[in-house]
Image (cartoon, grey):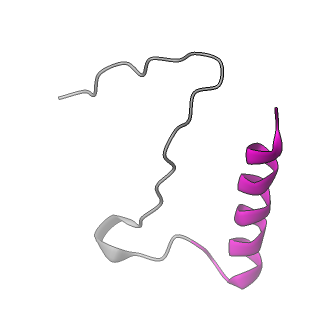
């Protein structure tokens, strides 16, 4: 069953969730994790 379409509008806030399938790791290493956090931080800083 597919999810409902996301309602999008200017200034909307969305929840980002990361988890591995069957408890698998989602980052290769600490550098990979830091790159992800940097990218999320850049996205949050955009007006």
Q: Nearer the viewer, residue 47 or 4?
A: 47
Is 8 situated above or below 33?
above
Residue at the far front in the pictured view: 11
Left or right relative to 40: residue 19: left
User: How many numbered discs sit on the rendered protein?
Assistant: 0
> In this picture, is 13 found above or below 39?
above
22 within the magenta span: no
Q: Quadrant of the N terminus?
A: top left
* Position of residue 34 measured from the top left corner of the image (x, y, whole percent): 75, 73
In the image: residue 23, left or right of residue 41: left
Q: Residue at position x 42%, y 22% from top?
A: 6
Is residue 33 rendered magenta in the image?
yes
- Most distant residue in the left direction: 1
Magenta part of the chain: 27-47
Q: Position of residue 21 (x, y in %)?
A: 34, 64
Q: Nearer the viewer, residue 14 or 1?
A: 14
Q: Residue visible at 76% across and 56% down?
A: 41
- The answer to whether 14 is drawn above or below residue 6 in the figure is below
**Is residue 27 left or right of 25 when viewed as pictured?**
right
Q: Which of the 4 quarters of the picture holds residue 46?
A: top right
State whether residue 34 is above or below residue 29: above
| Quarter-of-image position of residue 32 | bottom right
| Magenta-drawn stretch, dominant element (helix, strand or loop) | helix
* Residue at 40% in and 75% down: 24
Name the residue nearer the viewer: 30 or 12: 12
Please tell me which residue is depicted at 51% across the width and 50% down the height of the picture.
Answer: 16
| Residue 19 point in image, percent of width and height | 42, 64
Indicate left or right for 43 with 19 as reference: right
Nearer-the-camera pick, 34 or 47: 47
Instruction: Locate the C terminus by quadrant.
Output: top right
Q: Position of residue 14 (x, y in %)?
A: 52, 38
């Amino acid at each position: 069953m597919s999810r409902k379409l996301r309602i999008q509008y200017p200034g909307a806030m969305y929840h980002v969730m990361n988890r591995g399938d069957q408890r698998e790791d989602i980052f290769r290493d600490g550098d990979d994790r830091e790159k992800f956090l940097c990218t999320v931080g850049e996205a949050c800083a955009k007006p």
